[in-house]
Image: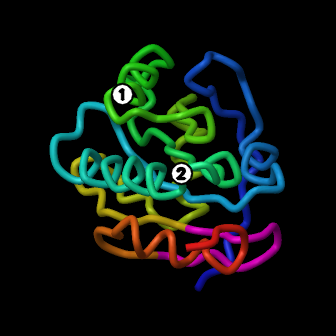
Amino acid sequence: MANYRVPDVTLVRADGKNVQLGSELDDGRPVVLSFIYTSCTTVCPVTSMTLAQLQDKLGGSRSLVHMVSISIDPEFDTPARLRDYAARFGAGPAWQHYTGTLAASQKAQRAFDVYRGNKMDHAPVTLVRGVLGAPWVRIEGFATADQLLAELADVCIAK
């Protein structure tokens, strides 16, 4: 469990819209947050596959959970690349992907203690927050869809 202060940064959603990270994360739904980049061939595809599996396990409840993937390589990850990446994993409307400036991405990474200075050094971390104001559950390493579902079970999802 960890308390993080969501930074005041503007990101660009895969649909091209500029958004405030705080507003996106505080939309009233539980949040599952990951940091990825689209050209990654190791950690990110595994993390994204797990989120795809979670989305499937949520079934009809999937719209009740806001799944968020923020690029750690915003200079390469344009909204169009994020849309293609999201499509590869079957991301539905409740699973959104974000990019932005390098400074904004790094500020978000630092706020959630995932910044490692180099995208090649990133580690798998998934964060879950059940309700606004609650501490975040930080899962180091590769989470499973069942672990994430269990973290969400008490707030909105019946197993």
Which of the 4 quarters of the picture holds residue 101?
top right
**Residue placed at 73% from the left, 51% from the top?**
25
Q: Quadrant of the N terminus?
A: bottom right
- Reading the image, the residue beneath label 1 is 85
**Residue placed at 55% from the left, 23% from the top?**
14
Q: Does the magenta stretch include residue 82?
A: no
Alpha-carbon distance for marks 1 and 2? 21 Å
**Residue placed at 45% from the left, 30% from the top?**
74
- SS category of the residue bearing label 1: helix
Q: Does the magenta stretch include residue 136?
A: yes
| Residue 143, position as x, y percentages in the image | 35, 70
Q: Which of 79 and 146 is in front in this view?
A: 146
Indicate left or right for 61 with 149 as reference: right
**Residue placed at 72% from the left, 54% from the top?**
7
Q: Is residue 28 above or below residue 158?
A: above
Q: Is residue 22 above or below residue 99?
A: below
Decide: few, some or many residues near mark 2? Use Cα within 10 Å; few <14, some 14-19, many ≥20. few
Amino acid beneath label 1: Tyr
Which of the 4 quarters of the picture holds residue 137?
bottom right
Q: Nearer the viewer, residue 3 or 62?
A: 62
Amino acid beneath label 2: Gly
**Residue 107 visible in the displayed image:** no
- Reading the image, the residue beneath label 2 is 59
Q: Is the magenta stretch mostly helix, strand or loop?
A: loop
Residue furthest out toward the left? 41
- SS category of the residue bearing label 2: helix
Q: In this view, does 132 lie above or below 16?
A: below
Label 1 vs 2, first from the N-terminus? 2
| Residue 15, position as x, y percentages in the image | 61, 18
Looking at the rendering, the stretch of residues picked out in magenta corresponds to 128-138
